[in-house]
Amino acid sequence: MSIDKIKSNVGGCMTVKTFKSDEARLKLRDILDDVLRGDTEVIIERYNKPSAVVVNYEQWQALKRQQYAALLAQAKQVSAAIASGKTDTISHEDLKRLMLEKRAAHVGD
């Protein structure tokens, strides 16, 4: 296990712990206790690559709200561009593909 401290947006520090998957399986109860306190995030590695993150439910809900807000803002931009004549309409499949490409480009950010 490795432990890092990072500054939180809300002030204070957030602890980030990294576990190998076999170690995480054995320490699941401790991992959940740490995460439920709200000051710890856990990265689980498989074959030495990050494969999952454990955060508490409130943090996950906040992330989902941010994703929804970003998607809604993107849809409003497209709608405004179409309404102003700056762009032509596109098919649902093309829009979906463009949005997925944009989201994939931001995953590493």
Image (tube, grey):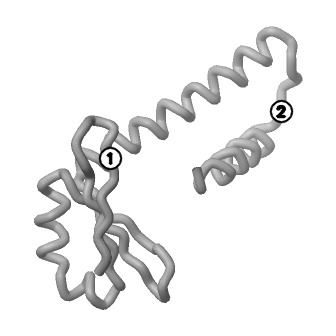
Q: Residue at x 44, y 84 (%)?
A: 46
109 left or right of 105?
left
Find the distance from the CA under tag 1 to the CA under tag 2: 42 Å
Eyeballing the image, is 103 above or below 11? below
Q: Residue at x 55, y 28 (%)?
A: 72
Dividing the picture into quadrants, the one containing residue 18 is bottom left
The residue wearing badge 1 is: 7
Dividing the picture into quadrants, the one containing residue 32 is bottom left
Give the percent coordinates (x, y) of residue 99: 69, 42
Dividing the picture into quadrants, the one containing residue 22 is bottom left
Task: Of the two numbered discs 1 and 2 on the same chain, state the one appearing first in sequence.
Answer: 1
Graded by Cα atoms within 10 Å as few (under 14), some (14 to 19) or many (20 or more), the crowding at tag 2 reads few
Q: Which mark is residue 27?
A: none
Eyeballing the image, is 2 above or below 14? below
Helix, strand or loop for disc 1: strand
Q: Residue at x 70, y 19 (%)?
A: 79
Q: Nearer the viewer, mark 1 or mark 2?
A: 1
Q: Residue at x 23, y 58 (%)?
A: 40
Q: Which mark is residue 90?
A: 2
Quadrant occupied by the N terminus = bottom left
